[in-house]
């Protein structure tokens, strides 16, 4: 299997590339400032930004799946939905059969009937950042012509959380938690980067979902 | 007591306002947007003023006759300097109203790290957040120059979480971030507090002041 990873230089992107190689995949690793020489013959480094349609189409042509994990830019979060839209346009042009994405958990629902972005975990002054992530959910909802799966990580996903080798999923847009009676979402809903990457690669190897948000947690 | 909470619809302000009301005080809330006050403070039974905190004339009526005030606003990305204008305006209005106590919410970025450097030196902010974080040390300097009022700056930690319990098991330190593991390179993550305990401390310092004219860190 040949996969393209968009956002290959980030915390999650690096783990995805490493784990994909471990499963015997070949990888096209994309990032705006990617070094073409990755030091590994199985990984082709491709420097391409979301607005370089031709470069993206070339990078996506012939792959079995495109994995999209680039985050919203901190200094211009409002452009995130249109950035995603441009990457998906290139997916269409290249005729890629499958998209496996990661999208922030701000838009997910809680057992208490509130969306995570509306809870007191988010300050009024930073809410606009998370609202742009929520808007990006709609980009996927509108992509009814593509075979996409968007993984939504737990409320807390931090680099230093050690992997457990397990995860649980839901398909009703609700956070996966260990205790649905608690509003302490960042304590009861957690996942490591490594286990998140594992879930995304499992979905590539054994497709189980399509056109749905899959929330993910321990 | 008559207490005015400035920034009463914020995550900290609304908890402070609620606790003060529960303790039987005469509470007034100040915020920019009356529509938000109607939603966030519904059912609390407190008087709200829609006021521009940066405008002393607008703020004056909300502080007139008050014994104490709590300042719980936060800087915005769009105009971080406005926060300092607000601070100056609040200090002037508080002097004019002859408040006996002013408790303000600061941030851990105004403190020193366990190794003695400032938090901002020990762990420089992401460029996007730098303009917001740099106003906190500047605000602390404005308070330190204030000799008339009995003020207190309370710095919550980075790991400040909602929906917790009032335990009062926090520790208090002057100028230095309270952490459980100073040697941890992620020392910030070992400085933890619930918003409920933060509000409890602020209310206690309004009712029974024990720290005066200093910046304190609060964490478990």
Image: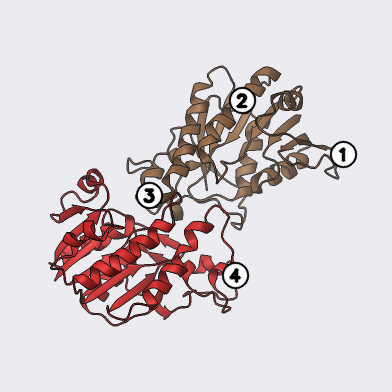
Chain colours: A brown, B red
Q: Residues within 10 Å of mark 3 (few under 14, many from 20)?
A: some
Is B11 on the left-hand or right-hand side of B96?
right
Disc 2, disc 1: CB below 8 Å? no
* Residue occupying image coordinates x 74% and y 45%: A18
Q: Position of residue B210 (x, y in %)?
A: 28, 82
**Farthest residue toward the front?**
B57
Secondary structure at numbered mark 4: helix
- Residue A41 is situated, as x and y percent measured from the top left of the image, at 87, 39
> Where does label 1 land, which residue?
A41
| Residue B48 rendering spot, x and y as whole percentages | 17, 54
Instruction: In the rendered structure, find residue B122 and report the number of the disc placed on it.
Output: 4
Q: Nearer the viewer, residue A122 or A147?
A: A122
- Residue marked by disc 2: A88
Residue found 47% across the figure and 57% down from its top: B132
Q: Residues within 10 Å of mark 2 (few under 14, many from 20)?
A: many
Mark found first going from the N terminus, 2 or 3? 2
Q: Which residue is mark 3?
A: A124
């Amino acid at each position: 299997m040949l996969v393209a990873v968009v956002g290959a230089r980030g915390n999650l992107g690096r783990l995805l590339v490493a784990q994909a190689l471990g499963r015997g995949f070949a990888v096209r690793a994309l990032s705006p400032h990617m070094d073409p020489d990755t030091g590994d013959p199985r990984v082709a480094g491709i420097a391409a930004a979301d607005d370089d349609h031709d470069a993206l189409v070339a990078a996506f042509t012939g792959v079995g799946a495109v994995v999209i994990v680039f985050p919203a830019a901190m200094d211009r979060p409002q452009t995130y939905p249109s950035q995603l839209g441009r990457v998906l346009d290139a997916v269409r042009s290249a005729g890629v059969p499958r998209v496996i994405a990661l999208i922030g958990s701000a838009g997910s629902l809680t057992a208490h009937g509130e969306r995570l972005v509306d809870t007191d975990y988010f300050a009024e002054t930073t809410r606009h950042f998370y609202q742009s992530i929520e808007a990006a959910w709609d980009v996927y909802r509108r992509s009814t012509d593509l075979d996409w799966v968007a993984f939504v990580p737990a409320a807390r996903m931090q680099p230093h959380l050690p992997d457990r080798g397990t995860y649980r999923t839901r398909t009703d847009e609700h956070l996966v938690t260990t205790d649905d009676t608690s509003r302490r979402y960042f304590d009861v809903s957690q996942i490591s980067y490594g286990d998140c990457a594992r879930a995304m690669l499992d979905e590539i190897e054994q497709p189980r979902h399509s056109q749905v948000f899959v929330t993910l947690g321990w | 007591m008559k207490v005015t909470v400035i920034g009463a619809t914020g995550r900290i302000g609304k908890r402070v306002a609620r606790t003060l009301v529960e303790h039987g005080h005469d509470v007034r809330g100040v915020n920019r947007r009356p529509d938000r006050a109607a939603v966030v403070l519904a059912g609390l039974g407190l008087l709200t003023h829609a006021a521009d905190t940066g405008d002393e004339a607008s703020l004056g009526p909300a502080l007139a006759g008050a014994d104490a005030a709590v300042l719980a606003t936060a800087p915005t990305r769009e105009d971080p300097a406005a926060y300092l204008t607000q601070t100056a305006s609040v200090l002037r209005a508080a002097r004019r109203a002859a408040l006996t106590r002013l408790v303000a919410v600061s941030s851990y970025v105004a403190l020193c790290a366990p190794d003695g450097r400032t938090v901002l030196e020990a762990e420089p902010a992401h460029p996007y957040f730098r303009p917001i974080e740099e106003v906190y040390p500047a605000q602390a300097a404005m308070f330190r120059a204030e000799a008339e009022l009995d003020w207190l700056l309370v710095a919550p930690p980075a790991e400040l979480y909602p929906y917790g319990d009032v335990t009062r098991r926090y520790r208090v330190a002057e100028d230095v971030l309270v952490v459980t593991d100073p040697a941890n390179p992620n020392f910030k993550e070992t400085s933890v507090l619930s918003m409920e305990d933060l509000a409890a401390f602020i209310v206690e310092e309004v009712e029974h002041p024990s720290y005066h004219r200093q910046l304190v860190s609060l964490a478990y």
